[in-house]
Amino acid sequence: MLDILGIRQKALLKLLLKNKAGMTADELSEPLAVTRNAVRQHLAALENNGLLKKGDTRASGGRPEQLYVLTEKGSESFARHYAWFAQLLVETIEQESGADGLSERLNAMGTRIGTQLRNQHPELVKPEEKIEKLADIMDQMGYSAQVANPNAVKTDAIEADNCVFHTLALSNPKVCQFDLALLSAFTGETVDHQQCMATGDHICRFKFVEQKK
């Protein structure tokens, strides 16, 4: 997110990151070396993007001063390198429990999360309803997901253009089992992982097949 912002807006967000209690427009204008009006324009743009918000007001002996603070989205816009930690966790589990133990752990985690998400939507009954909602949830999670062939008679597949575990999955493809378990638990159907970016495909494609009873 920071990559698409201007130099002044990036600097403004960094100032708020360092000053968690918030800063006023006047306090921001001096270190940014811009006018108060220019600061207010930047504040308005960043607020519209959900990166900051109005915080508390502060007594000043006259008119209360408005403080601006980062939102959660604003904080998350700064780079946070989780990949190395995730890699460490996966490697540690595999070293301690073996390949089969890692698979079991990933399946259990995916099943638990998928069940939790499914329980939040008791209104979903039909398979296509579950798949459509799951595509929305995955999209919100960063998968850039959508229902495959949305105009088809039957909704039975999801395609994702972004794998949130891509780097990790390249070095350990077993990580994909987390996704498969989550998708299966949410829909109650078997998942056929037809295409996978970790193995060189341009997308990940998940086809849902009714489980045999």
Image (cartoon, rainbow, N blue to C red):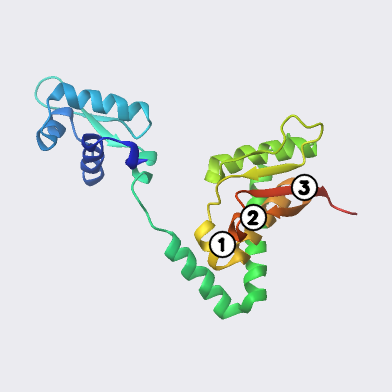
Q: Within 10 Å of the Cα at label 3, are there few (<14), some (14-19), or many (20+) other Cα atoms?
A: many
Which residue does the image show at 61% across and 65% down from the upper left? 173
Q: Within 10 Å of the Cα at label 1, are there few (<14), some (14-19), or many (20+) other Cα atoms?
A: some
Quadrant where the N terminus is found in the figure = top left
Residue under numbered circle 2: 196
Q: Is residue 48 above or below residue 116?
A: above
Q: Quadrant of residue 198?
A: bottom right
Q: Earlier in the sequence, mark 1 or mark 3?
A: 1
Q: Amino acid at mark 3?
A: Phe
Q: Is residue 67 above or below residue 180?
A: above
Residue under numbered circle 3: 208
Contact (Cβ within 8 Å) of mark 1 with mark 2: yes
In the picture as drawn, the residue positioned furthest to the right comes out as 213
Q: Amino acid at mark 1?
A: Ala
Residue under numbered circle 1: 169
Q: Amino acid at mark 2?
A: Cys
Q: Quadrant of residue 134?
A: top right
Q: Nearer the viewer, mark 1 or mark 2?
A: 2
- Tell me how far mark 1 sits from mark 2, CA to CA: 10 Å
- Tell me how far mark 1 sits from mark 3, CA to CA: 21 Å
Which residue does the image show at 75% across and 53% down from the upper left? 191
Which residue does the image show at 47% across and 70% down from the upper left? 88
Residue nearest the observer in this picture, 124 or 45: 45
Q: Is residue 188 above or below residue 55?
A: below
